């Protein structure tokens, strides 16, 4: 369905997220607990909003990156939680690897925020009012410090358990022929020493946007995309 141009287009990521929450309330939320998004949600949104002159793919991609990197969203990526499509229908379940990555990303984001705002360090650890750009303030008001510490310990134990299991398998990465990369393709993205599962969302020249298994949308280079072949160690 074609949407007529709006004189007040959503010109910021926050405004566009509010616009998406209005159009797809069963999928996007502005307050309270966020819902994990379906892998490939960018393509679904791009198709649904293809004739909507209020939204461009570039701004949509930026808004999704803003939404999925917020503390409120990262806290929703827990083992067993359900991913939803635009209609709010449950389509997949969060596994341990996805939950661990989201937990690691959240911890790193909070640490960076604490370093930039040392006077607000206690608020960051307790999950209170202060939030980095791209995060919702309301998400940090609820959890007391003791509860947060217990959750962190549980997550760290889960990570240790996962790492022990991963040691049994060696992962060999092979570079993808850049000319063959297509939207919707499953790939591995190399970040540091850890390759992450991802789906290609958009390719523009040598730049590519991918959605990680955690649900986060990130921008990288074609040269960072791989496919994997696993060989069990004896």
Image: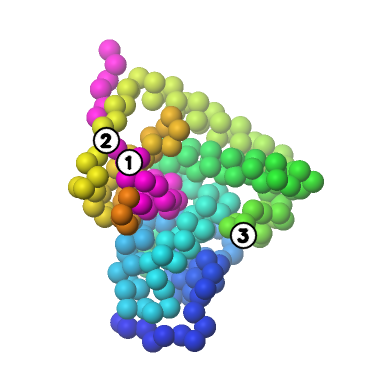
Which badge, 1 or 3, is on the more N-terminal residue? Answer: 3
Element carrying mark 2: strand
Q: Depth check: give the residue in front, 107 or 38.
A: 107
Q: Nearer the viewer, mark 2 or mark 3?
A: 2
**CB under 8 Å between discs 2 and 1:** yes
Which badge, 2 or 3, is on the more N-terminal residue? Answer: 3
Q: Nearer the viewer, mark 1 or mark 3?
A: 1
Quarter of the N terminus within the rendering: bottom left
Is-magenta flag for residue 212?
Answer: yes
- Crowding at label 3, few (<14), some or many (≥20) Cα neighbours within 10 Å? many
Left or right of 110, for residue 97:
left
- Crowding at label 1, few (<14), some or many (≥20) Cα neighbours within 10 Å? some
Residue 80: tell me if it is visible.
no
Q: Which of the 4 image quadrants contains residue 118?
A: top right
Image location (x, y in percent) of residue 218: 43, 50
Image location (x, y in percent) of residue 206: 32, 50
Which badge, 2 or 1, is on the more N-terminal residue? Answer: 2
Q: Depth check: give the residue in front, 134 or 103.
A: 134
Q: CA distance from mark 1 to mark 3?
A: 33 Å
Residue 36: tell me if it is visible.
yes
Residue on which the image places disc 1: 223
Element carrying mark 3: loop
Residue on which the image places disc 2: 175
The relative height of residue 104 versus residue 34 in the rendered view (above or below) is above
- Crowding at label 2, few (<14), some or many (≥20) Cα neighbours within 10 Å? some
Q: CA distance from mark 2 to mark 3?
A: 37 Å
| Residues in magenta, as a range | 207-234
From the image, give the main secondary structure of the stretch colored magenta.
strand
Residue on which the image places disc 3: 136
């Amino acid at each position: 369905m074609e949407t007529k141009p709006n004189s007040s287009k959503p010109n910021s990521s926050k405004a566009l997220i509010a616009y998406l929450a209005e159009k797809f309330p069963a999928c996007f939320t502005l307050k309270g607990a966020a819902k994990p998004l379906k892998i490939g949600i960018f393509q679904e949104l791009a198709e649904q909003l293809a004739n909507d002159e209020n939204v461009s793919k570039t701004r949509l991609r930026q808004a999704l990156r803003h939404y999925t990197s917020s503390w409120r969203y990262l806290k929703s990526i827990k083992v067993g939680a359900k991913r939803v499509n635009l209609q709010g229908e449950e389509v997949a379940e969060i596994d341990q690897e996805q939950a661990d990555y989201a937990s690691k990303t959240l911890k790193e984001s909070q640490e960076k925020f604490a370093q930039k705002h040392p006077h607000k360090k206690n608020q960051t650890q307790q999950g209170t009012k202060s939030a980095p750009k791209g995060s919702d303030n309301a998400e940090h008001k609820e959890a007391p410090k003791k509860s947060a510490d217990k959750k962190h310990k549980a997550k760290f134990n889960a990570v240790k358990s996962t790492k022990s299991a991963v040691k049994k398998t060696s992962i060999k990465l092979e570079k993808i022929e850049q000319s063959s990369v297509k939207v919707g393709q499953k790939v591995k993205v190399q970040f540091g020493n850890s390759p992450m599962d991802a789906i290609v969302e958009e390719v523009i020249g040598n730049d590519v946007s991918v959605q990680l298994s955690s649900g986060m949308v990130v921008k990288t280079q074609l040269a960072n995309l791989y496919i994997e072949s696993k060989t069990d160690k004896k």
